[in-house]
Amino acid sequence: MHTAALKAERPASAADAPMLSLSGVSKSFPGVRALHNVSLSLYPGQVTALIGENGAGKSTLVKILTGIYQPDEGEIRIGDDAVKLPTADAAFRHGITAIHQETVLFDDLSVAENIFLGHAPRNRFGLIDWRTMRANAREVLETMGAGHIDADARLRDLGIANKHLVAVARAMSIDARIVIMDEPTAALSAKEIEELFELIEFLKSDGKAILFISHKFDEIYRIADRYTVFRDGEMIGEGLLADKPQNEIVKMMVGRAVDHIFPEREPKIGATILSVSGLSHPTEFDGIGFELRQGEILGFYGLVGAGRSEVMQAIAGMTRTSAGSITLDGTPIAPKSAAEAIEAGIVYVPEERGRQGVVIGLPIFQNVSLPSLDRTSKSGLLRLAEEFSLARTYTERLDLRASSLSQDVGTLSGGNQQKVVIAKWLATEPKVIILDEPTKGIDIGSKAAVHGFMAELVAQRLSVIMVSSELPEILGMSDRVIVMREGRIAAVFENKDLDAETLVRAAAGIAA
Amino acid sequence: MSALLKYREMFLVAAIALLIAAITLRFPAFARPQNLAAVFNDTSILVILALGQMAVILTRSIDLSMASNLALTGMIVALTNANFPGIPIPLIILEALTIGAVLGAFNGVLIWKLGIPAIVVTLGTLTIFRGATFVVAGGTWVNADRMTPAFIALQRGEFLGMPVLSWFAIVAIVAFYLVMTRTPVGRSIYAVGVNPSAAVYAGIDVGRAKFVAFCISGMVAGLCGYLWVSRYVIAATEVANGYELNIIAACVIGGVSIAGGIGSVGGAVLGALFLGIISNALPVINISPFWQMAISGTAILAAVILNARGERKQGRIILKKAEAA
Amino acid sequence: ESIKIALVVKALGNGFFDAANKGAQEAAKELGDVEVIYTGPTAATAEGQIEIVNSLIAQNVKAIAISANDPDALVPVLKKAMDRGITVISWDSGVAPEGRQMHLNPSDTGLIGETIIKLAADYLPEGGDVAILSASSTATNQNAWIEAAKKVLPEKFPKINLVATVYGDDDSVKSTNEAKGLIASHPNLKAIIAPTTVGVVAAAQVVTDQNLIGKVNVTGLALPSEFKQFIDNGASQAVALWNPIDLGYSAVYLAHGIATGKAKAEPGAKLSIGKVGEVTLDDTNSAAMAPPFQFDKSNIEEFSKIY
Amino acid sequence: METSAAPRRIPDRLDTPLKGAVLSWEALLVAVAVAIFVINSLASPYFLNAWSLSDLTFNFTEKGLIALAMALLIISGEIDLSVAAIIALASTLMGMALQADAGTPMLVAIGIGTGLLCGAFNGLLVTGLGLPSIVVTIGTMSLFRGVAFIILGDQAFKGYPASFAFFGQGYVWWVVSFELTLFLAAALVYWFLLHRTSFGRRIFAIGNNSVAAQFSGVRVARVKFILFCLTGLMAGVASVLITSRLGSTRPSIAQGYELEVITMVVLGGVSILGGAGSIVGVVLAALIMGMVTFGFGLLNVPGIVMSIFIGLLLILVIALPIIWRRLFGRRPA
Ligand SMILES: Nc1ncnc2c1ncn2[C@@H]1O[C@H](COP(=O)(O)OP(=O)(O)OP(=O)(O)O)[C@@H](O)[C@H]1O
Ligand SMILES: Nc1ncnc2c1ncn2[C@@H]1O[C@H](COP(=O)(O)OP(=O)(O)OP(=O)(O)O)[C@@H](O)[C@H]1O
Ligand SMILES: [Mg+2]
Ligand SMILES: [Mg+2]
């Protein structure tokens, strides 16, 4: 079967009753109110776009609908029946399927099994029928236009985009009435996105209700019929998309005019402080060369997987390189560990906060002092007073919200955790600070604080490299922008009259 | 299934073939089919135990209490047999399976419902079960003279030219193969080990999968309790003392990853056979049995190093993909 | 107040020592004012016995009679016991002379050594290969008997060829594996001599399982009750042992005598052991009881009911 | 918890240190220890006696010494199952040196040195090749003890010099043994190392999140390697003590000690998953295990029966706080 062949003519009618409706749903985590009294309706044969800034509560809602989280209060109705979804299994059985934001798949299992785990076809003895399962997997993949993926391959050996397609296939393999897609296009190429949209059209025509989450407005306008906007865990508005221009939706999302987010600043750019040339890695990047000047914010832009993080981790001593040289303040350095890089004056604020940034289980002040322990302790002996004063200085500058410095960082909200992470590396008093996706997953207020602080840092003659996949952030903060593509530098721009389209073209390798 | 797993098992088969060849050089009779069959028979109990342990290790847990469970169940069935000689042996086997499973479920419940790490729970039950063995028997041993002939004879009987004990192992291998590869329970055990958080999204209860794995390992240990006491015709507190580490070693040599999610029935069986061959061969080729321990230690280390190479995560390889595109 | 005497054995649960305890209790009843503490580790290790001796010292026992898992490792702790005024004797398996006041051998060492070989030789008129399956490699008594056996071999049993000595550590599984190894690596093996009650049962079971009855004869030291079936099925022609009940009885009787000052442990002394008779101490303060008693088809039935 | 109107100035801590101490794991252990002490005193008239109490300490000092280092290792997220085998190998090599007429200082050096080298070998395999420590040390456990068996076979080394006997049998003052003195001194050193130095802080950071620690400039591999060396070293020290106490060496020496040491560490409140624990807890756990085994010994309860108690204690002490929290600790979100 192919999507095009089965496309039925069944126009969506707004008069239909909602297939799924949510009302008064709230959900809190320790210290964070993720959702507050929200409502949402999904209609058969229609795509509803759920729109909101990072941390608005979109994924939390998805997890509630798929039985991963339980709402603190509120009601879920499918058709006319109020339902409870205590487990992922219960959600399956009510015909709800989802493609989650993070790829929640099994690296060491085959593609076919990743698609069918939990609902594998059985033979007449009740045993799993691998042959049928593989055949079905191939069919599902083909239907989606992902026939190039080998159903027998181990998932580990697939690239990120293909993994994402497997996640889509898994959702499609369940005969569901309600399909949820949480940023399904984030890791896909243009061609794959096209195929996904074709699939969505088919599902629509099949009368399914679809919830589509994306940060990309072109996609939303192309595929969605309705919109629902969330801000800070609350439902701000909903309606038919055709009636709503983009700028109004953005206003609903952000709650204020967008250009206020980025601080005004007068860059005072000095001499070169860091110069990198010919930096190469056997498999990840090649011939990376650039200069960073004092008091400058250098933006690194690229599509996800372009290799920016790998380059930055190499500069900060975390990965070994095969060739190239790094000069800091006129002295050549070759850091072999993060410890050496920190000593030299280069710090890297990592992208994955939970895994690489905070040490959950240790209190705030110990997190902040960790890279500076040699400074706060005396001949190996801890001096708590020094640690507290260091932690207080930096956390207060970042306007951290916490009840005490002895509080476990794990009890802080994501944005406040990110502040602790940044404070931790600032406390080492570096010359160069590399921020990898510094505002990923933090709320709008904290985002502004981080941006304001970056401005303050460069004003104090520090030099900043900022890796970001968010165009407004790159455009709003950088003095210069380097675009990476597939492990190499694709272009370098001065940020004067730079526009988003130029950057996207460079990142995707499309000639201007 | 996966090519890599196949490769790993082939590697073990090759290592075992090499081992047998080397032994045969010193002692030609070793490779005779009857002798190899005898070695398999001798290793049957370890094979069955290794399969049970594999199910647990796959879920990122470990069962240190298997040998103690074996001793306790073995003692209880031996006492049952001694005190009620009229009870038929199939019922005795059922008793062994049940008691073993109950002891395994005790571990499993603590892990599932209280979330205590498996290594802590089974470290505790390791001593509790063994102490209980002493207590239920009042500190005595049950010797051959108190067991019925049928109790002792069952596993020694022959069926289609092979001892019944070997058939126990063969049935266990087939059953495990089917359960681990062809049933939702088996696959959920793998899934939980590969990625516990993804398992939640797939509708699998992680704690329950661990509980099931512990019931399986307990049941298997219970069965081996009967097999052990009837094989060595003695039930004592010290039976199989320290054997838990041999079982784990068999799994490790067989390529079962201690980090969970990776391992196969074939691998665990081959790992157990590898250890069985070594312990059988050393006395006959006149290498002092004192070498046995060092040799199996070296084999374990070699296996971990080799497996780690096979498993080493590939880099992202951005550049290669760029060239291919 | 009664006198506490501890009977420390190699491992609890062993039928041989349970029988010895029976004798010890008899002695206690006979002596009247004695309380016997029967104790031992669960696995036959020296560390386990040391912890036990420590707790006995703390309980102020009057005397300790020990069958030791290691002749040397226990010396320091037993010395400590003697320093605190406790009478220490060893029995069955001895400790080095500095760690005890006297040692009671169940029988004459030379005699046992000769008997275990003779048990095998009696049924091998043509001679042939034999092997020994012993207890642990550090067991004092077994080592002494094997030594003695090796001494008499060349002159008295020239046709018997001792091909190997292996150790099963008084562990059934290890003993079983060692017995199998012996059979596999010595195709002409005619007899396995196991001077330990655990090893002899394991070896006889292996011979039975491998259908070697009539080809390999198992002999050694065995408890009649545990071993009867193997005499019955022919895996063994005959085994020997002394009376463990008498041994336990004597150990407690002697410990009591020395502890109360009624007897003195010194070379040449003649010490009474009640109903069993008397023993004479040699230069190392060791004494031997009766010669080993032989069990075969004719009498095993009767003795298996006793111990 | 967070409040939206947090003060600009964040206080260092909220709880007074005393309040934290009262509710801690160590407090629970102190209560258990006192209870066992009282029960022992009531159950046996021989318990409350200076010499009895002194003899009691021998039940835990050697394992306790290893537990101190093992605690650090487990806090860092690793484990060493080979410690008992290291004792056997170190003791065997000391025995060999003895055959070559080595003096007491030489013997001690060889014992401790062997331990250190074995620990370094474990550390190298784990940190150098990135292998899981539980598997590596199951392997080296067989390897080390196996080498001892190959060297010693069915023999035993004995005849250690009189001066060597002091370590395992000597008394520093009245009833205070050398072993106990050494244990207390080592406990102090390890307490200081773990709780008062930057090295100790790094151990906690690694145990809680080794990737983040690495990114924060902690030399994770180096710290772990040092911890394996320390654990081996302590096993070497324990080997000297045990060999001296037994006055002889057999390859089967210290069989099964590894699990007792780990039980001690876990009972002491160290998280088996790494990242949490204290030396005070471990010392208390050592004391509890010593008192339980000795107390049961005084009542002539077989050792195997006490192990039921230890096993139950281990599970209960860990399970009870969890059950307690489930029943009563439901905090409003
Ligand atoms: N398990 C959790 N524990 C604590 N806080 C959480 C948890 N999951 C989500 N949150 C918090 O809830 C809020 C909403 O998060 P959610 O993931 O739903 O946002 P989102 O709208 O999906 O954002 P994005 O666009 O970045 O995916 C955030 O502040 C987040 O930090
Ligand atoms: N093949 C892959 N398999 C799994 N995850 C991947 C893969 N490729 C990329 N990712 C994930 O996508 C994210 C971005 O990748 P990475 O950081 O390496 O690229 P980048 O160019 O630095 O992009 P950015 O820093 O903007 O995210 C990471 O979270 C990474 O784990
Ligand atoms: Mg989200
Ligand atoms: Mg990145």
Image: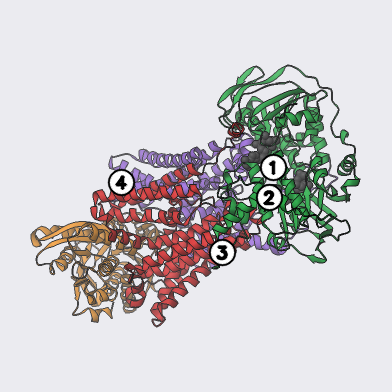
Chain colours: A green, B red, C orange, D purple
Query: How far is mark 1 from mark 3, CA to CA?
Result: 40 Å
Name which residue lies at 63% across and 18% down: A331
Q: List the residue tagged with mark 1.
A: A192
Dots 1 and 3: beta carbons under 8 Å?
no
The chain holding disc 1 is: A
For residue C63, which quarter of the picture? Answer: bottom left
Name the disc covering residue A11, or none.
Answer: none
Q: Can residue D26 be seen from the camera position used here?
A: no
In the structure shown, which secondary structural element does the residue marked by tag 4 occupy?
helix
Q: Earlier in the sequence, mark 2 or mark 1?
A: 2
Q: List the residue tagged with mark 3.
A: B212
Residue D294 appears left or right of B85 = right
Quick check: B62 above or below D114? Answer: below
Type of the residue with mark 4: Ile
Q: List the residue tagged with mark 4.
A: D151
Dots 2 and 4: beta carbons under 8 Å?
no
Tell which tag, 3 or 4, sits nearer the viewer.
3
Q: Quadrant of the N terminus of chain C?
A: bottom left
Q: Are marks 1 and 3 on the same chain?
A: no
Type of the residue with mark 3: Val
Q: List the residue tagged with mark 2.
A: A168
Query: How far is mark 2 from mark 4, CA to CA?
Result: 61 Å
